[in-house]
Image (cartoon, rainbow, N blue to C red):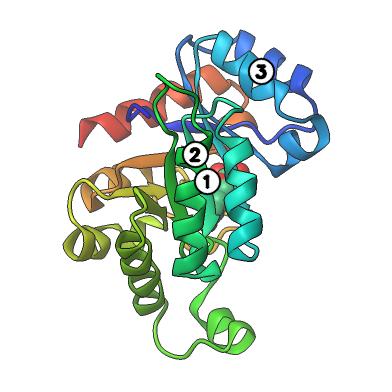
Amino acid sequence: MNRSPIIALDFPAPDDAYAFLRNMPSGLCVKVGMELYLQNGPDVVGRLKEMGHEVFLDLKLHDIPNTVGRAMEGLARVGADMVNVHAAGGSDMMKRALDGLEAGTPAGKKRPALIAVTQLTSTGEGQMNSEQGIPGTLLDSVIRYARLADDSGLDGVVCSVLEASAIRDACGENFLKVTPGIRMADGDLHDQKRVSTPTDAARAGSTHIVVGRAITQAADPAAAYETVKRLWEER
Ligand SMILES: O=c1ccn([C@@H]2O[C@H](COP(=O)(O)O)[C@@H](O)[C@H]2O)c(=O)[nH]1
C-alpha cells in the first residue's frame, strides 16, 4: 500500500462508508475491519477498490494453521492490498497464512501484504502481565512477536508508534510497521492505551499510520484528514 494515512472505515454498513467517502479526497488508503466486513461480506472491498482506494482488510485471523491457511486462500481473492493475522497464533499459523495467500492470489495479481498484530494498541503493560500472563515489558513482547513474524516470512506487523523504532532496529527498514492508536495532541484516547501523534509516528519510523475516529468523528473529516496527512508527511 502507498504510505498515505490509512483511514479506518469503522461503520456498520457500506452506505455509511460510501457517504463518508463522498466528502473525502479520491485515491485514499482505507481499512475495512470486522464491523463492516462481518456484517456485509466481501463486496465492500471490491467496491472500494473500484472507487480507486487501496484497502487494508483488518480481520486479524487467529486459529489453527490449517484453518487460517484456507481462510487466507479465500481472502486472497477478495482483492485487498493488505491482510493480517495475530502473531500470537504462532509461526506455523503465520507460515500457513502466507502459503494460503500465495496459493489464492489470482495469476497476474500482486499478493496482498501480510502483517501480524503484535500487542493491540488498546493493551497496556499491566494488563498484558496480569491477563495474558506474559511477564516483562510490553516492548519486549512486541519485539518478540515482530521477530517471529519476520522469521515466518511476513511483510510486517501492527504495533504502536512506541515500539516502531525498536522494530526497525530488530527487523529492518523495509519491514512494515503499521501503527494504529493515532491521536492529535489534545485528542480523546477512547479505548486506546498506546497512542501517539502523526508527527511522532513519522519520527519513530512507522511505515503506515491507521487513523479512525480522529478523522471519521471530526466535525470536518476532510480537514482532519488533511491535517493528519500534513503532519505525517512533514517528517
Ligand atoms: O492494535 C490494533 C490493531 C488494530 N486497530 C484498529 O485500528 C483502528 C483504530 O481506530 P481509532 O478510531 O483510530 O482508535 C480500529 O479500526 C482498530 O480496530 C487498533 O486500533 N489497534
The residue to which callout 3 is attached is 20
Q: In which quarter of the image is residue 157?
A: bottom left
Q: Mark 2 near mark 1, Cβ–Cβ under 8 Å?
A: yes
Is 161 positioned to the left or the right of 32 in the image? left
The residue to which callout 1 is attached is 100
Q: Is mark 1 on a helix, strand or loop?
A: helix
The residue to which callout 2 is attached is 103
Q: Position of residue 91 (x, y in %)?
A: 44, 68
**Of callouts 2 and 3, the N-terminal one:** 3
The span from disc 3 to disc 1 (Cα, nearest Å) is 33 Å
Q: Where is residue 41 in the image (x, y as percent from the top left)?
A: 76, 30
Q: Alpha-carbon neighbours of circle 1 within 10 Å: few (<14), some, or many (≥20)?
A: many
Q: Where is residue 153 in the image (x, y as percent from the top left)?
A: 33, 55
Q: What element carries label 2?
A: helix
Residue type, numbered disc 2: Ala
Residue at screen point 42% across, 33% down: 111
Residue at screen point 55% across, 80% down: 128
Disc 3: residue Cβ within 8 A of ligand 1's nearest atom = no
Mark 2 or mark 3, whichever is nearer to me = 2
